[in-house]
Image (tube, grey):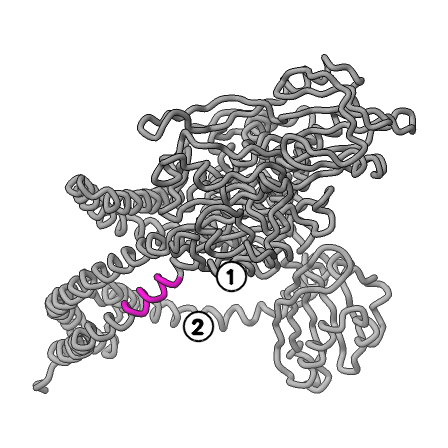
Amino acid sequence: MHMRFSILKKFLLAFLTLSLLPLFILSFYARETLMEIGENSVTGSKKALLENATSLLEARARGIARQVELFLQVCQEDLNALSLLPFEPDLYLAFSKGHRRRIWIRRGHSDRIEEIRMFIPLYREITYADTEGVERIRILDEQIFPGGRHVTLPFRGSFGRENYFNDAKSLPSGENYVSRLMGRHVRREEQLRGAENVENAVGGEHFQGIIRFAAPVFRKGTFAGVVSLALDHRHLMEYSQHVLPMGDHEVVFPSYNSGNYAFLFDDEGWIITHPKFWDIRGYDRDTGVLIDPLSPAYNETAMKKGSIPFNLFHVPFIHENYRRIASDVLQGISGVTATSSVGAVPRVLAYAPIRFTSGEYKKTGMFGGVTLGARTEAFYASIEHTALSLRKTLLRTLHHFIFIILATALLVSLIAVLLARSFSRPIRLLGQKVKEISAGHFDVSVNIHSGDELESLGRNFQEMGRELEQHRRHLVQSLQDLQLSRKEAVKERDFIRSVFSNVVSGLVVVNRQGIVTAVNQNIERILGLSWEDMEGQPVQNAFLPCPDILKYIRDAVETEETVSRDMELRVDGPRKYIELTVSHLKNAQPPDNRSLLVIIRDITRRKKMEKYLSRSDRLVSLGTLAAGVAHEIRNPLTGISLMLDDLHDRMSGHREDQMLMQKALEEIEKLENIINELLDFASQPKAAFVLSDMNTVIENTVFLINKQCKRQHVLLFRNSAPELPVIRMAPEKMKQALLNILINALNVMPEGGELHIDTFVQENLEMFTGRRGIEVRICDTGPGVSPADMDYIFDPFFTRSPKGSGLGLSITHAIIEEHRGKIVVDSKLGRGACFKIFFPVEE
């Protein structure tokens, strides 16, 4: 019969319709859809960049606040150390000379400015006053001055009125008195001395002030006097004078007019460090007392004139948010807000509290706060630049997409013609051979060489003919063998009894009345139930400790069908999995007297291995995908980098534009580093394996993190097994695997904790089929791993850290696998995590 519409034509029509029609529809709607999605992406990216920038600014302010807190703690520790010294001037002088720190300042004149880094005493003055309030020892600027000054009554010193002796004398042992900043207020004209602005005011007057630390001294439980340290204000200026809100570089003196600078203020709202010295708190030179912010003289005119210091609680005429900043800091709150400077420069201001609970600051619990500001226009400029780059990239992507669609349509058409031809010829040939087999010619030859399922189908046709002939002969032989089957029945019965007793699985037979009639001994090993006690018991009593098994037995009785389940066994001890099969013994006579056969097999080891293999397969797939994506991204990323670098060179006359391009190049470099990590993960190079000692590798790895442990107050504990067997390994790769785990442990313990690293010799490891091995155990006291995350922690890109790439543990897993080892994790929330690594030992 002639076919007017052959399979070739049908296949071409269907293939081209199903392939090309969606492509053309997709190309028609591609532009509108991609532009809408792209604009949403740009808007979301701008929002994310803004949130990230403000978070970084706030984090930097908190970092400065933490540095000041530690500095104040060091001053108190110095005071405590001073109180233990004998009352000898030479010892006090040596103490003063032993406490020096470097400062970075400017000197010279406005037309010739020099930057100098020099060491100066940390404390301007060190004193000891006896029980009568007479200063017996006084070290001033590293020189011994004659004593004799009476400080029992309030007195006016070089930096203002003080009463530190009485304030410290009344304190119990172990507590210190700490004053607020004292010093004479420097007016605007005194700092400028004719200069146009503070940036050029080098030869003007500097603010000189101190913070007094004092403590009572006891000898053998008896009050013996008061010691004091006068902290030089210039060292406090070092924490705010040189920082900038954006970038990592520092300056000797910030640009006030740019709005990019930081300052500190105390718990009363007074500024205590600032580029403009006239904003710093101090006593009035005429009255000798601190300027009152509630007086009528404290107003906007005086503030802009530079005749009064700056108090954040009392400057609503400058900006209303300054009061909010000071109030938040006293409540221990950090944040980011908008303000403006006295010169009306709009700023984005991050602030953070400085916690301190001694002396004058005990009432509020705060030393004050730190602010870090950036000019508003500069803060948002980089975000807008990034958004513009995203829009350009989106447009290029749209053009590439349309080109790919058209090229794909042409390629699909060509492939459709080739595939249709490869299908139609073998199908016609198979139709002819089917007719030959139907006619009884079983020995057929089907020559199809397509390399696919059709070729396999042709071979199956040939096999089918031969098997039909074999089945005919087997049927005759089976009739003869049936006569011998009765003789084998007795042997088979005895064999079944032997199998029942010796089979590895647990077997239980339950009759129609629900009584356990037979149990093998493996039930006791798997379920922990006595097989002797179970036999002869009703099934509900025999399986009383295992209600889940009893439920499936009842289901099998009711449905009269075979029930097969894998289930987790809830028994005491380690988690165990079993395979439960409940079936009817269908050869019973009469049929209504059939028994149930319950087969229970311990599949715990298989479940664990399936889980481990599943994770390994997933890592291999993700690694392959990661490598493909990395290769596809690297080429356009290199092109972007080269074009930006060329554009950077062309913009030599535009400094700000060059800085923006440099930042973009740095971000591209970070992306290239991530791509390199992806490629390293996906294609781990083969390393040379040598016999090495694991304890030595661990010692070399721990050496790299000792300093970080001390800095984070993490206690490190080692327990190395003596005479640990050597194994074949690549020491450097093994060090990398261990270091990834140790760094993760330190990252989850920023405030301190414990890190345990132990090694053991294991004589019978089940995962290595009973072979001897070694175990490395790394445990921390961090927050632990969530149960929901346990199955994914070794997956690439899976991380709960905002700074992590999610590749560390994936690389570690790959290295352990390369060494024929196994790695598992035990963790409970709030109790830390423990990584256990096992390696076989070669005999």
Residue 27 image offset from top left, x and y in percent:
17, 73
Badge 2 crowding class, 10 Å Cα cut-off, few under 14, some 14 to 19, many 20 or more, is: few
Residue 674 image offset from top left, x and y in percent:
37, 45
Q: Name which residue type carries label 1.
A: Pro
Mark on residue 427? none
Residue 32 image offset from top left, x and y in percent:
21, 75
Q: Is residue 424 left or right of residue 841?
A: left
Give the SS element for disc 1.
loop
| Residue mark closest to the camera, 1 vs 2 | 1
Q: Is residue 543 above or below residue 795?
A: below
Q: Is residue 310 magenta?
A: no
* Quarter of the figure that contains the C terminus: top right
Q: Which residue is mark 1?
A: 316
Q: Quadrant of residue 109?
A: top left
Mark on residue 475? 2
Residue placed farthest to the front in the image?
286
Residue at (72, 72) in percent of width and height: 549
Residue 62 image offset from top left, x and y in percent:
55, 47
Q: Is residue 182 above or below residue 55?
A: above
Q: Is residue 109 above or below residue 435?
A: above
Disc 1 to disc 2, how far (Cα)?
106 Å
